Image (cartoon, grey):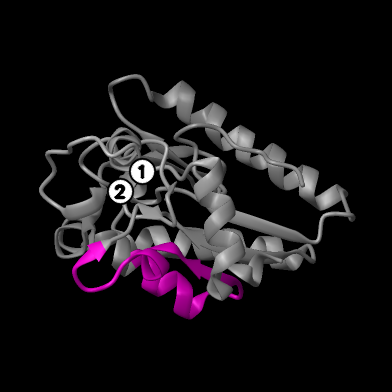
Amino acid sequence: MVQTTRSVCGPMLGVAFFDDAGYDRNWAKSCIAFSDSVFQYLKRTEGIERVILTSDFDIFFEGRVIVRDAQGQLEVVRFDPKKAADAFLQTIAKLREIGKRVVVVAPPPRATFNVARCAERVIEGLPVIQSAPGCSISAPKYKRKHADLEDFLARVETQADAAFVDLPAILCDREKCRTIMDGIALYRDAGHLSYEGSRYIFTHFPAASVIR
């Protein structure tokens, strides 16, 4: 397994997050170049059969992005879930063209608190002051706050020529999204799975086994 990731640089060819607080035009240009280099690596490496794509994704439609146009020029635009899904679907199509099977992993539900610290206290039997029981994430609040992300993921799931792992569907019911299972803290912060949590989910839930 080869991991190629860069923080805040999502898996979309020709697209990069952009703002005025550090992620400027030069950064966006380097992000796009990084994604291009990963694609070229995949293109010349026949031994890699499957490509797993994941990201927070909502960074692409919560603000501005820089997009490379047909002439290779960079322009600043605003994405919505549909435009972001179209760009992501084009990336998946290009990976399929070079013979790769693609798996898309939807990001785990994001909390508004440090889930790992909360879970550590629960597991150790210490008192916790938290609105949701057991360090869980309120599913209704999460869905309301991330409605655009759900729209984006629904478009990708129905239109992409790829397998799809829906982590929110695995972790959430109507009321809550679980962050602790069998005494294991699934998260390492507010939005990333821990090593142990990843291992638990991808070995205990058939829906996640499509990666294998």
Magenta region includes residue 45: no
Q: Which residue is mark 1?
A: 191
Q: Secondary structure at mark 2?
A: loop
114 or 72, which is in the foreground? 114
Residue 83, percent from left and from top: 37, 61
46 or 84, which is in the foreground? 46
* Alpha carbons under labels 2 and 1: distance apart: 4 Å
Classify mark 1: residues with Cα within 10 Å, few (<14), some (14-19) or many (20+). Answer: some
Q: Which residue is mark 2?
A: 110
Residue occupying the point 24% across, 35% down: 126
Q: Amino acid at mark 2?
A: Arg
Residue 55, percent from left and from top: 47, 48
Q: Is residue 43 above or below residue 169?
A: above
Residue occupying the point 30% across, 50% down: 61
| First reached walking from the N terminus: tag 2 or tag 1 | 2
* 2 and 1 marks in contact (CB < 8 Å): yes
Q: Which residues are magenta?
A: 152-176
